[in-house]
Amino acid sequence: MIVRKIKVENFRNIKHAELDFCEGVNVFCGDNAQGKTNMLEALSICLGRGFRRARTASLVPFPESDDEQTRPNTSLTLYYEADAFSGKQNTVHYKIVNGRSSVELNGIPLKAASDLYGELRYVIFAPEHLALVKGAAELRRYYIDNIAILQHKAHKRAAADYAAAVKQLAALNNEILASPDTVKNTSDMIGIWSDILIRQGINLTYGRLKYFDLLRKAAVDLYSELTRGNEELNIIYHSNVFGNVEGSLPDFTSKNELYGMYVEKLNKFQFYGQRSDFRIRVGAHKDDILFSINGINGREFGSQGQVKSIALIMKLAEAEIIRSHNRETPVILLDEVLGELDAMRRDYIVNRLGHSQVFITACDHRDFLGSSVDMRVWEVKDGEFYTSGRERFGIL
Ligand code: ATP
Ligand code: MG
């Protein structure tokens, strides 16, 4: 996919902007609080999913004075080509009128902007994604589930059914704790939900591992390129039922076999009786992804630059999966990625993300000096975008 142009009217601090993009690297450069991230957010909304997950009301510009009654209408128009060869131009028009948002694709109203997601694809790296390495395991499960869901709708069902089983078993457990006499009455229900827990837990783990293997391979190669072979990244999926998995689950031929392993593991947690909480002490909702660099735990001992590099590479690996699996080239949005990275890693980001269209924010234009790739630079000041950025910054 190639994004040709965006027109922005009254979006956060951007009153009006009309930007024609290049197929290579598009840079929004300027001081803090000028509107760079706002422009990435506008792009992501048009691509079906605002990456900041902001409320609609917060997207409309603040009133300029206290007595201002009406707020202006917001309008974002994105022109893109789904595939660069056909040349067919499509238009997404997102607007907010009187606080209500609506979206049209080529003039046809859609139920929700999220209908676009999946048809249009982007991958974003923003500072909050450092949590992918540093934050709770839940974020890493969410990351891998999202990738699997985009590729395979049934994964969504498995994730939802599994979460329901965990919730129901926890509720049954609370009932039993409150009044132990209920054990008998609830044992049927515990049996039913435990079966769902195991079956969907296996489906969930299977679905995750299917894409984890691809992700791992892509990420390991990309990390090596980023660091010119100086650092070696390794990634492990830790299933607390099946143990550490470095690739897919090739050794397990049948799901029955997995079912047996799962039950065996669950049984180990039932020394003290048939209480349901023992069933939810293990399972896919406790799994994690572990990162190491040159054999050292990245999450615990990684430097800031290494943690950022891992998170970024996981995002680029996600783009790689979309490219190889869906034969589509997602747009890459990079917010604040260059800070804390050394010259070699910055050079990789600026010059080597060759086959994707990139939108990147930066405070320091010097990061782009001497770049040889197809590049367009805007200087961003107080919500205005100046195309003269490239000449002004001397980026040739
Ligand atoms: P930084 O380099 O610090 O990340 P930035 O250029 O990315 O800066 P943005 O996040 O784009 O900055 O925000 C620019 C300004 O937009 C901020 O000062 C913010 O307060 C302002 N802003 C956010 N929402 C609105 C809104 N609804 N109306 C008007 N201004 C807003
Ligand atoms: Mg910003």
Image: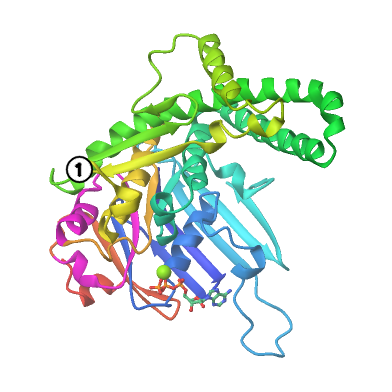
Image quadrant of residue 244? top left
Of the pair 301 and 106, the residue shown nearer to us: 301
- Residue occupied by mark 1: 294
Of the pair 152 and 163, the residue shown nearer to us: 163
What amino acid does circle 1 point to? Asn
Image quadrant of residue 329? top left
For label 1, the SS is loop
The answer to whether residue 308 is visible is: yes
Q: Quadrant of the N terminus?
A: top left
Q: Is mark 1 within 8 Å of ligand 2?
A: no
Span highlighted in magenta in the image: 343-369
Q: Residue at x 57, y 58 (%)?
A: 53
Is 60 displayed left or right of 118 in the figure?
right
Q: Residue at x 38, y 15 (%)?
A: 250
356 vs 302: above or below: above
Point out residue 356 in the picture as x, y percentages from the top left corner: 31, 45
- How are the residues colored? rainbow
Point out residue 175 in the picture as x, y percentages from the top left corner: 81, 38
The answer to whether residue 84 is visible is: no
Is 361 displayed left or right of 287 in the figure?
left
Q: Residue at x 64, y 63 (%)?
A: 55
Point out residue 48 in the picture as x, y percentages from the top left corner: 55, 49
Number of dots carrying numbers: 1
218 vs 79: above or below: above
Is 178 displayed left or right of 123 in the figure?
right
Image quadrant of residue 181? top right
Q: Seen from this angle, which residue lies furthest front?
A: 272
Q: Quadrant of the C terminus?
A: bottom left
